[in-house]
Image (spheres, rainbow, N blue to C red):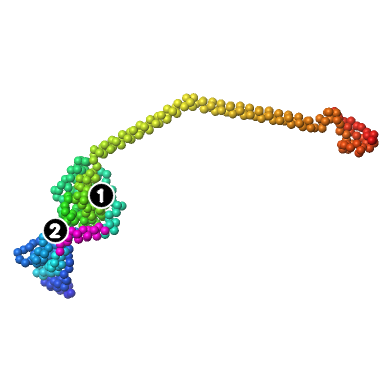
Amino acid sequence: MFETSSEAPATVRTVSEAIKEYVDRLGPIWIEGEISELNERSGMMAFMRLRDPSVDMSISVMCHKSVIAAVKPLPDNARIVMYAKPSWYTKNGSLSFSAREIRQVGVGELLARLEALKNLLAGEGLFNSDRKVALPLLPKVIGLICGRNTDAEKDVVENAKRRWPSVQFEIREVTVQGAAAVSEVSDALRELEANKDVEVIIITRGGGSFEDLLPFSDEGLVRLAASCTTPIVSAIGHEKDSPLLDLVADYRASTPTDAAKRVVPDISEEIAMIGAMRDRARRTLVNRLDLEATRITNFRNRPVMKDPHVLITTRAEVIAGLRDRSNRSFGASIKLAKEELKQIKARVRALSPQSTLDRGYSVVQLADGQIVTDPKRLKAGDELRLRLAKGETKATALGN
């Protein structure tokens, strides 16, 4: 480290040499990326650009041709890992890496990494169904991210226009495979997400190899799609293809044509459905009116509606019947009670002392009213009262 100030600045040479000294102390490291350029010049050295597929950034790499020969043949945009040491060139102030070993990343390793990334994103809940946003019923403006002059673009636009001619598109043609795919698709997605007129975004491309579809499994692009509030439809490759973008999208279409059919309703089908609903509503209304008319007719045909006095006369007849039945019941009860009373009266009369007196008997009483039942109790000269059937008389006892 060295001290500098505005009065004592360091020269470019001093700064460049200091950077070189610092970089030279760094040891070799493993780096992963995609080969965007490869130049095997006449001589012993080869030069390349190693690019990060998720961002627009690359580094310069040189190596001995034998290092490249050990991994040939390399496809376009091959994904590699290299063991390289950084170097700083003081004359032009550039950083470069010298590769000592290069390994091509195989499909099996890529699949393993994708599976690990898939599990990571699933653990964060980015694929949960409750995060999915419902697609609009009839979008006025559709955002479309696709390749340049591709069949996928034509399939989406033509099928959508055929189903609903007035639908509008905001189309962003981008690179859909290779080194620039992730950055261009991401930029287009951000632009359409910021457009308030766009109601749904379709991301589509035709089929391709596993490596061709890798940009649509990039972690940065997947997280960007998950953060969007505008519904996203993914139509990548064929039905058997399943990039991670399909899992985070709000709807996964098997083909570009399927995406157009899912996003845009068929005008003829909608008109037919509206006609069927209108007919069903008319039938329901007519049936309800017929039912209510029948009820009104039935009400009008009731006797009480023809002659309102029927309600009174009917109740009067019921009351008269109840009154007559009550009178008959009450009269019968009185007659029965009279008969019972007459019988009781006859029994009482038959058992009364007067009835005995009427048959010629009499009751002998002393002057104090005691009834004489034993003649031995009488003395000569006792005054007696004789109660007869029709009155009383007096007598005097003469003795035994």
Magenta stretch, main secondary structure, is helix
Total numbered labels placed on residues in the image: 2
- 353 lies left or right of 183: right
* Nearer to us in this view, 272 or 24: 272
Residue in view at x 71 percent, y 28 percent: 339
Q: Position of residue 323 (x, y in %)?
A: 60, 28
Q: Which residue is mark 1?
A: 251
The reply, left or right, for residue 292 in relation to residue 32 is right
Kindly identify the residue that appears in the image at 20 percent across and 54 percent down.
Answer: 216
Q: Position of residue 69 (x, y in %)?
A: 9, 64
Q: Amino acid at mark 2?
A: Asn
Q: Is residue 348 shown left or right of residue 230?
A: right
Q: Residues within 10 Å of mark 1 (few under 14, many from 20)?
A: many
Locate the C terminus and report the quarter of the image it occupies. Answer: top right
Q: Is residue 17 positioned above or below 68 on the image? A: below
Is residue 342 visible in the rendered structure shown here? yes
As drawn, the label of residue 77 is 2
Contact (Cβ within 8 Å) of mark 2 with mark 1: no
Farthest residue toward the top?
A: 307
Q: Amino acid at mark 1?
A: Tyr
For the residues labelled 2 and 1, the Cα–Cα distance comes to: 30 Å
Quadrant of residue 300 within the rendered picture: top left
Work out whether 255 lies above or below 121: above
Please state, as top left, top right, bottom left or bottom right, where the N terminus lies in the image.
bottom left
Residue at image location 85% in from the left, 28% down from the top: 360
Looking at the image, which residue sits at the far bottom? 2
Residue 191 appears in the picture as rendered: no
Q: Residue at x 52, y 27 (%)?
A: 311
Circle nearer the N terminus (2, 1):
2
Looking at the rendering, the stretch of residues picked out in magenta corresponds to 103-119
